[in-house]
Amino acid sequence: MSAKILIVEDEEKLARFVELELRHEGYETDKAFDGRTALEKAVEETYDLILLDIMLPGLNGLEVLRRLQKEKQTPVILLTARDAVMDKVAGLDAGAVDYITKPFAIEELLARIRVALKLHHAAEDPARDAEKEKTEKGVLTWGPLRLDEPRHRVTYGSHEITLTNREFVMLKTLLSNQDIVLSRETLLNTVCGYDYVGETNVIDVYVRFLRSKIDDVFSVRMIHTVRGVGYVIKPWEGDQP
Ligand code: CA
C-alpha cells in the first residue's frame, strides 16, 4: 500500500508541482492551500506524512503543527523560507520530524520523505524492527565493511577501524540509508542532535575523517558527494577504487 501524503502550500503552482512529483513516485496525495483546511484534513483523514509550509494564510504552519500534535502523531516535514532559523527551531521544538528550505531540489525533498516515512514506520512497528534486529544482530555491512552496533565496532575485512562517536553515528546513518542521498541538515540532526548550534559544514569535516580512515586506506569509494544536496553510500558493487 502506498503512503498518503498531505501537501500544505498556499503557492498553488508549487503545490501542484510537488503533487505531480509525488504521484510520479507512487505516493497518494492530497492538498490544502490554507492553515485551517490543512488542520481539518490532518485531523479527520489519515496521512502517513504531511508537508507543511510555515507561511500560510489563516493559520500559520507552526500553529497547525502545534494543534495537530495534540490530536495525533502524523510525521510532519516543514517547508521553510531561506534563513528562517527561528521557524526551524520552533518547528522542531513543536514536533516536526524534519524541515526543508525553499527553494529545494525535488530529489532532496523525495529523499527526506523516504527517510521520514522509514523512521516513522520503524517507530510504529517495534515487532518488525525487533525481528529485523534479530536477523541482522545490529550489524550493517557494505562489502567487506562491517559496522557492529551493539559492540560499537567497525571492521574492514580483518582490519579494525577506530572511529569517534560522531563518526560512528554518521557512518551508521549513511549505511542504514544506502542509496538515499542524505542532506547535510539531516545528517547534522542525526549526528549532532537537533539542538546543535553551528555550521552544517561540520558534516563535511566528519565525511573527510571517514574518508581518510576508510576510503583512502582501503582504496574504495564509499561516501559519494551529491553536489548541492549531501552525501550517499551507494550499494557495494565490488572493488571500486
Ligand atoms: Ca507560503
Image: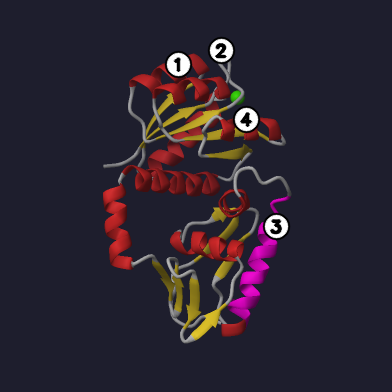
Q: Is residue 79 left or right of residue 236?
A: right
Amino acid carrying label 3: it is Val
Q: How far apart are labels 1 and 2 at the CA level?
A: 9 Å
Amino acid carrying label 2: it is Gly
Pick the front one: 76 or 111: 76
Residue 178 visible at all: no
Q: Determine which residue is flagged by label 4.
A: 90
User: Disc 1 on helix, strand or loop?
Assistant: helix
Q: Magenta segment range?
A: 199-216
Pick the front one: 19 or 206: 206
Q: Nearer the viewer, mark 4 or mark 2?
A: 4
Q: Nearer the viewer, mark 1 or mark 4?
A: 4
Q: Determine which residue is flagged by label 1.
A: 37
Of callouts 1 and 2, which one flags the residue occurring earlier in the amino acid sequence? 1
Q: How far apart are labels 1 and 4 at the CA level?
A: 22 Å
Q: Nearer the viewer, mark 1 or mark 3?
A: 3
Query: In percent of the image, x 58 and y 53: which residue is there?
Result: 187
Q: How far apart are labels 4 and 2 at the CA level?
A: 19 Å
Q: Nearer the viewer, mark 3 or mark 2?
A: 3
Q: How far apart are labels 1 and 3 at the CA level?
A: 40 Å
